[in-house]
Amino acid sequence: MITLSSDFGSPYPGAMRGVLLQSTDARLVDVSHSFPRQDVRGTAFWLKQILPYFPPAVHLVVVDPGVGTDRPAIVVRAGEHALVGPDNGVLVPVAREFADEFEVFRVAESESADDDAGPGTRRVPWPPDPASTTFHGRDVFAPGAAHVHEAGIDAFEADEAFEPTDEYEEFPFPEPTVREGYISGTVLVVDDFGNVITNVPGDAVEDRMGGRVEVNTVRAPVRRTYDEVDPGRRVVTVGSHGNVELAANHGRGDKTFGVGVDDTVKLTW
Amino acid sequence: MITLSSDFGSPYPGAMRGVLLQSTDARLVDVSHSFPRQDVRGTAFWLKQILPYFPPAVHLVVVDPGVGTDRPAIVVRAGEHALVGPDNGVLVPVAREFADEFEVFRVAESESADDDAGPGTRRVPWPPDPASTTFHGRDVFAPGAAHVHEAGIDAFEADEAFEPTDEYEEFPFPEPTVREGYISGTVLVVDDFGNVITNVPGDAVEDRMGGRVEVNTVRAPVRRTYDEVDPGRRVVTVGSHGNVELAANHGRGDKTFGVGVDDTVKLTW
Amino acid sequence: MITLSSDFGSPYPGAMRGVLLQSTDARLVDVSHSFPRQDVRGTAFWLKQILPYFPPAVHLVVVDPGVGTDRPAIVVRAGEHALVGPDNGVLVPVAREFADEFEVFRVAESESADDDAGPGTRRVPWPPDPASTTFHGRDVFAPGAAHVHEAGIDAFEADEAFEPTDEYEEFPFPEPTVREGYISGTVLVVDDFGNVITNVPGDAVEDRMGGRVEVNTVRAPVRRTYDEVDPGRRVVTVGSHGNVELAANHGRGDKTFGVGVDDTVKLTW
């Protein structure tokens, strides 16, 4: 099984699917191609929430604001899973969910002749030639994921194109500031429903369930579910991800609270 | 085969796919994850139009404005199909398309210990514990659909988690008002092209094909296809669903007719 | 393998998947359902870029502004691939990528009785009855693709519903105008990132890499990758498709250059 995650929208994921299917009969499963665009932190958050629900798989991840620079392509082996994507930190938080320890491999580069030799199926070279391309999803990461899948998560390093390394990027999530009487956090992502997901752990509001809290300059009830407030009214809750979430019953939390990605959220009581 | 329908957009369907694939090798087929948001009636309309084109399958449906309340999760067995989703009426219209008679089962609830016991694949408990979650698509409905599929559409009730019931929500479609000289209906959905789909049966305009009809305050030609009017011009037609549709050739019917979901459409001649 | 391409957005592709799965166990692979709406040229461009990365397959393509008119449904056999869609030119450019020579077949029409004979799975007739429908994706093209797949790309013409023909629509891409000191081209598509893809071949700017060029009335650097300019700054590059692309590093090229689909792009040096 190979899962696909990107910020590509459409139609670029189609080309990645084609390249994968040239080399593998694996089941392909889309996670999403609407991850926050060029947002490593937001995507890392979502992957950490979602991928642990999958059975062992190769996970292809392409959210890559540095495409075209010399940031390497890497494979992370974590427990029974492998992650294939750019070395920009997006793979690390979910790798830690998969296993306490993980291994990182760089994908070697080659200067391959362009085999554009007439009509028919276009083949991408292996090892890949990143210098010749601005579409690494198709030309580097997809063939990488196919090679890992075909060799096996436990055995892919036999392919010399995968070089073990101890150097890789981390992308630490911001930590909330906890003080007497308040917690100050950050908005990590806003989901399609407008729910505002912060980095503040849900524990912070657990003993205020049924009460109220001040969010920046507005007061809001703290409730276990959206439906405990009237339609359209704001509510502070703990999302399925375990973090504090700012929402509105049958409405958009980002609008009613007036906050978006990267904004500070100060909870006071 | 398990089909997936929701109003989740992205990326929540990814988590449902993961949970399903933990428990089943079934083919997963997306119907859509862009059903009208929190709109039970609109989604029920679309499911009624689309799901009958599928071979026998388990259909997972999550359009659930009442998530977090105590509305039950149900399974509907209708002919060779099973539908799994919330008991809010969204499953009933399509069930009637599948079969004249159908059976309804409630999914039992349990208070399961959270098995968040360290890194690795996250498992959702069965029977599910709705009280512990705001993401019933992942934690209740997806495991329900996987259990129905693995046990078989004809045999799943052997699992004690499925309890037969005669109580379930209906969600009646509004009926158009037919009078001498006019019909007054309601807009059920607007599709991505801007075509306005009403609850008025196509028969109402069949004998006016080639003529004209007044729609609220504007007159418009009644034609069999969009292309029988000039580009940009409004047209009243009968859609592939059999209902009266307000459209514009190479344009948007909702804009040219000035109507949207829930609006009244009065056809006069 | 059957790939699916359309401009349907949602939820109509769900019905096509159902119809296909009534007749075939083939793997279904979405290319995209967000191709430029009712834009034959833009879709033809994308298909030409993407489908050659697929292994041999039947490709179902539904971008069909003439639905409901008498434009035929066709099958194009090109090398090891088959394309099924409307005869409006959308299939031809990618067919030439697949093979120097290709064959075209028309899908015969029939007047089938509507088998709407009560509840259960809805079956679409074969050969199809285009006159009875405004949803040819579901009622004509999807059953056509399933029939081609089941009979085999090399053998489907044994089905009398497929009639060889020498008449089919071409949809020529506009050619750029090359003069001393400038090239004048056209914007073919704008991708989801806002990158503006022109019909000007990348060769035109290859020997200006590292320099500058005038795009309509603004000057912009020519670089190999987006990251060679500061965030937000405009850049002229050669995309993964081989054509000149107008982009902005971490921004939208269409906004910063002020151009959109069909606009003229004049490059002067």
Image (tube, coloured by chain):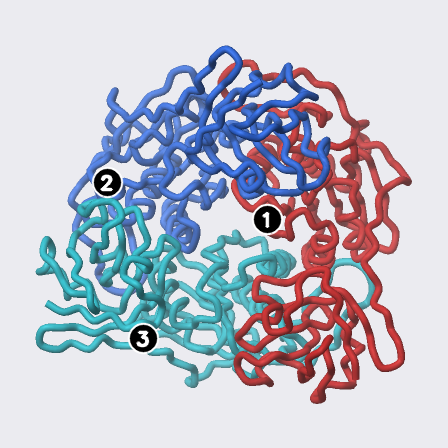
Chain colours: A cyan, B blue, C red
Q: Amino acid at mark 1?
A: His
Mark in front: 1 vs 2: 1
Instruction: State which chain disc 1 sits on.
Output: C
Residue B156 vertical placement versus A5 (above, below): above
Query: Are the residues under marks 1 and 2 on the same chain?
Result: no
Q: Residues within 10 Å of mark 1 (few under 14, many from 20)?
A: many
Mark in front: 3 vs 2: 3
Residue designated by label 1: C33
Q: Residue at x 21, y 45 (%)?
A: A230
Q: Residue furthest top?
A: B180
Residue A254 vertical placement versus A178 (above, below): above
In this view, the residue in front, A140 or B232, is B232
What's the distance in space between the residues labelled 3 and 2, CA to CA? Answer: 34 Å
Q: Residues within 10 Å of mark 3 (few under 14, many from 20)?
A: some
In this view, the residue in front, A57 or C185, is C185
Secondary structure of residue under mark 3: loop
Report the label total.
3
The numbered dot on residue C260 is none
Q: Amino acid at mark 2?
A: Pro
Q: Position of residue C261 (x, y in %)?
A: 69, 60
Q: Quadrant of residue A121?
A: bottom right
Q: Which quadrant does the C terminus of chain B fall into?
A: top right
The numbered dot on residue A173 is 3
Instruction: State which chain disc 3 sits on.
Output: A
Direction from residue C172 to residue B83 in the image, left or right = left
Q: Position of residue B216 (x, y in %)?
A: 51, 28
Q: Amino acid at mark 3?
A: Phe
